[in-house]
């Protein structure tokens, strides 16, 4: 199933989720055509941790799967019930 017809395979969307009570977070990358998702947990949401997570995700992929990456800039409401 193709989720988007105006994108090329290998274009990724990136986003981060910060835990409310600790400095840890999750870095996620979703391939925009197939919606295949990679997720990495980090000890903190810092530039260094984000770069390391991105490197760990993309180093394992062949070059045709690494065309581009777009950062997700949407802000979602914070959930407090978990």
Image (spheres, grey):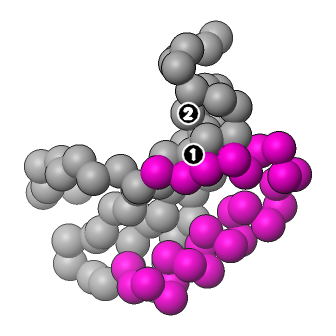
Q: Is residue 61 left or right of residue 6?
A: right
* Residue 18 falls in image quadrant: bottom left
Magenta residues, dominant SS class: helix
Separation of marks 2 and 1 at Cα, in angstroms: 6 Å
Q: Is residue 80 above or below residue 31?
A: below
Image coordinates of residue 37 in percent, x first then y, are 59, 43
Please say whether residue 79 is visible from this viewpoint: no
Q: Residue at x 48, y 64 (%)?
A: 27
* Magenta highlight on residue 16: no
Part of the protein shown in magenta: 45-70
Give the residue pinned by disc 2.
32
Whether the residues at callouts 2 and 1 have beta carbons within 8 Å, the answer is yes
Q: Secondary structure at mark 2?
A: loop
Relative to 67, is 82 on the left or the right?
A: left
For the N terminus, which image quadrant? Answer: top right
Quadrant assignment for the C terminus? bottom left
Residue 58 point in image, percent of width and height = 72, 61
The dot on residue 12 is 1
Residue 46 within the magenta-colored segment of the rendering: yes
- Can residue 9 be seen here? The reply is yes
Query: Tag 1's secondary structure?
Result: strand
Residue at image point 65% right, 29% down: 8
Q: Position of residue 36 (x, y in %)?
A: 64, 36
With 51 as the anchor, is 56 left or right in this view? right
In terms of depth relative to the viewer, which is nearer, 69 or 26?
69
Q: Residue at x 41, y 55 (%)?
A: 71
Q: Mark on residue 37? A: none
Q: Position of residue 50 (x, y in %)?
A: 50, 76
Question: What is the crowding at mark 2: few (fewer than 14 residues within 10 Å), some, or many (at least 20)?
Answer: many
Q: Residue 8 versus residue 21: which sits nearer the camera?
A: 8
Residue drawn where x is 43% and y is 84% of the image: 47
């Amino acid at each position: 199933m193709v989720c988007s017809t105006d994108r090329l395979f290998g274009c990724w969307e990136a986003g981060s989720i910060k835990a409310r009570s600790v400095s840890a977070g999750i870095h996620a990358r979703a391939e925009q055509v197939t919606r295949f998702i990679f997720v990495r947990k980090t000890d903190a949401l810092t530039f260094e941790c984000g770069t390391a997570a991105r490197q760990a995700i993309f180093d394992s992929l062949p070059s045709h799967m690494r065309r581009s990456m777009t950062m997700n800039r949407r802000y979602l409401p914070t959930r407090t019930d978990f």
